[in-house]
Amino acid sequence: MKSNCKYIFVTGGVTSSLGKGIFAASLARLLQGHGFRVTIQKFDPYINVDPGTLNPYEHGECFVTDDGAETDLDLGHYERFLGIETSQSNNVTTGAVYQTVINKERAGDYLGKTVQVIPHITDELQRRMMLLGESGDYDIIITEIGGTVGDIESFPFVEAVRQLKWKLGNTRCITVHLTLIPYLASAKELKTKPTQHSVKMLLESGLQADILVCRTEYPLNKEIRRKLALFCNVNINAVIEAIDVDTIYDVPLSLLKEGLDDIVLSKLRLPKNGEPDLTTWKEFLSRLKNPTRTVRVGLVGKYVELQDAYKSILESFIHAGAANECKVDVVSIQSDHITSENVHDKLKDLNGVLVAPGFGDRGIEGKITAIQYVREHNIPFFGICLGMQCSVIEFGRNVLHLKDAHSTEMNPKTKHPVIDMMEEQKNITEMGGTMRLGSYDCRLYKKTKAFETYRSQSISERHRHRYEFNNDYLKDFEAKGMTAAGINPQQNLVEIVELKDHPWFVGVQFHPELKSKVDKPHPLFVAFIKAAIVNNEKNS
């Protein structure tokens, strides 16, 4: 069956970090509101096969999909905005493309031909660009091209889009170029020249932008829009203002006011049946912008200087706050800086504390010290992955009096490995894509906070780890009050730990933040914020 799927490519110019992912997700949400089946994919020009081995300071968080793919953080935006699930097919890198082409060359698939960037790399890029569209599951595929036009590593991607646009025609394939209109304070003027140069660079690669989306601090007047249209060779109604807004969740409505959905549907020859249905979106925004109370929540981690390192956690707080009609004031705390001497001053004014995931031993003792403080002072606690493991270590040391208790990740020679490497991980030597990744089942025990929160005994959550609770110590832990609230039924792995005699103390081995969405906030985050509200009211 021949696919009639339409394709939208989003490129970026002038500077990086303009927000192509947020723009693509916002456009997709508008088109989804018109009743179209939409998904988004990210093509990244770096040579890593995936972001799995990248330091969060390099590339922000690594977002994990249900099928176990380690992907770019923009896929988190796609899922949160659209309420959909993404997969390995939604994220492609130069590394993955070259790996496929080289494997084919080694297998003799090219019949002795000289393997080159054009046509072999560009053909593989086009194949992957169209893969999701050929499934028949979608009406529109939006593809975000990572990096900035003009970067040397972006050339094959732009050339692949040029060829694809030529093959499909202008009514099945359009290009949206996101750019920056800087404001010079000294001249009190918006400058269009950087955008003109960026579009010219795109044209030199043979690709004409159909729509120009301009990031700006100030509104674009008619004169600027006309100038951009004239020198960038686009229709004046295709010059779209993307003005700075209070929250990323305002972007779809801001683009709606600019008529972006109208111009896209017109260019793709798709019908427009009235205004897009954004009812639930607007309800969410109303709750977000009109909170009835505020809580202060500590985020303890070792990458807190870079917000993108914990992007999904921060967005989950926003979703959970809106669900509770509460503003969540997140206080980032570098775990390296926490000591037994200053922990009281750092945590005493917080209504709840989340200890973040991570790898390696840097900052580990600060996390353990923070957990001891919140446990002893009845402050709501939420531990994710390594955060959960740290809560087990802390409990082992200070309640079970196993002074040497630790994880073998940090101390392979510990006498009490309360956290140990998973059995199937012990013979693995390669780091990339080899952890326990993706969705796994969890069975919850009744009469636990986890069961009360999920209201179900069977759940499925996403994982990314190599180490686990050591079941040899489970009876000792449960005898002292730390219980296993959830177990993976296939391997009997402890997925959730709780404290019986504590207002709200929950640690999870999985990553709940990866499944929180605008229209479906994650129940654990909602319950944690609710516990923080109760704690705040009790102490005020």
Image (cartoon, rainbow, N blue to C red):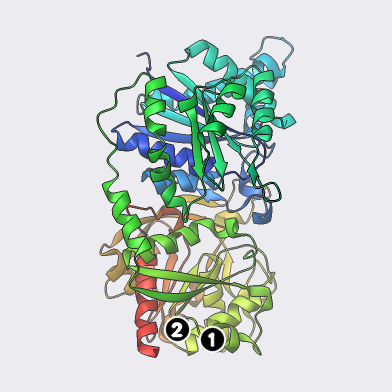
CB atoms at circles 1 and 2 under 8 Å apart?
Answer: yes
Query: Which callout, 1 or 2, points at the residue further toward the start of the chain?
Result: 1
- Location of mark 1 (residue): 373
Determine which quarter of the picture holds residue 288: bottom left
Residue at left 64%, top 88%? 340
Q: Residue at x 51, y 45 (%)?
A: 243
Q: Amino acid at mark 1?
A: Tyr
Is 204 left, or right, of 522 in this rendering?
A: right
Q: Position of residue 297 (x, y in %)?
A: 48, 74
Q: Residue at x 35, y 56 (%)?
A: 285
Front residue (pair 509, 335) = 335
- Kindly state the secondary structure of the residue where label 1 is placed: helix
Look at the image and tell me whether residue 307 can be seen: yes
Crowd rating for badge 2 (residues with CA inside 10 Å; few <14, some 14–19, many 20+)? many
Label 2 amino acid?
Answer: Ile
CA–CA distance in space, label 1 to label 2: 8 Å
Position in image of residue 436 (x %, y %): 53, 53
Point out residue 483 in the picture as x, y percentages from the top left corner.
40, 77
Q: Which mark is residue 123?
A: none
Q: Is residue 66 visible?
A: no
User: Camera-side residue: 63 or 81?
Assistant: 81
Task: Look at mark 2 in the image and give the residue it sits on.
Answer: 379
- Crowding around mark 1 (Cα neighbors within 10 Å: few <14, some 14 to 19, many 20+) is some
For image coordinates 61% across by 40% down, the residue present is 181
Q: Label 2, secondary structure: give it.
A: loop
Q: Tell me the quarter of the image containing the C terminus.
A: bottom left
- 50, above or below 340, in the image: above
Q: 275 and 459: which one is in front?
A: 275
